[in-house]
Amino acid sequence: MNGSITYESWKYYSIKFELINAKLQILAMALDEFCDFQDKRLFYVRDCIEELAKEYMDILEDFNNLKTIHPQPHN
């Protein structure tokens, strides 16, 4: 993905990415700490979290390849 983005948009999405990352980490830790993996449904949940993490990393890579356009100062 090649493109450009304003600094304000970049900052907004940067914060959203941080929130998504934090939520994925919390879900992964909750599974490890509190779940009994004898329940087959939990394997499905874990697989979903892993898929989300991969999608997140792909989107983050695209996002990091964008060029930031800084607003022009007003005279």
Image (spheres, rainbow, N blue to C red):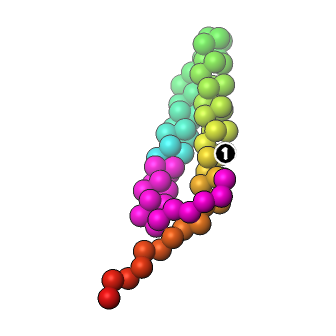
Residue farthest along the bottom direction in this orientation: 75
Tell me, yes or no, if residue 11 can be seen here.
Answer: no
Residue type at mark 1: give it: Asp
Magenta residue check for 54: no
The picture places residue 18, in percent across and down from the top left corner, at 50, 51
Is 14 displayed left or right of 45 in the figure? left
The picture places residue 16, in percent across and down from the top left corner, at 46, 49
| Quarter assignment of residue 46 | top right
Q: Main secondary structure of the magenta part?
A: helix
Q: Residue at x 60, y 30 (%)?
A: 49
Residue placed most toward the observer, 32 or 72: 72
Relative to 24, say whether 63 is above or below.
Answer: below
Residue placed most toward the observer, 34 or 2: 2
Q: Label 1 belongs to which residue?
A: 58
The picture places residue 39, in percent across and down from the top left corner, at 62, 11
Q: Residue at x 65, y 46 (%)?
A: 57
Tell me, yes or no, if residue 17 can be seen here.
Answer: yes
The picture places residue 11, in percent across and down from the top left corner, at 45, 61
Residue segment shown in magenta = 1-18
Is 37 displayed left or right of 71 in the figure? right
Magenta residue check for 17: yes
Relative to 30, say whether 9 is above or below.
Answer: below
Q: Residue at x 66, y 53 (%)?
A: 1
| Quarter assignment of residue 28 | top right
Quick one: SS at disc 1?
helix
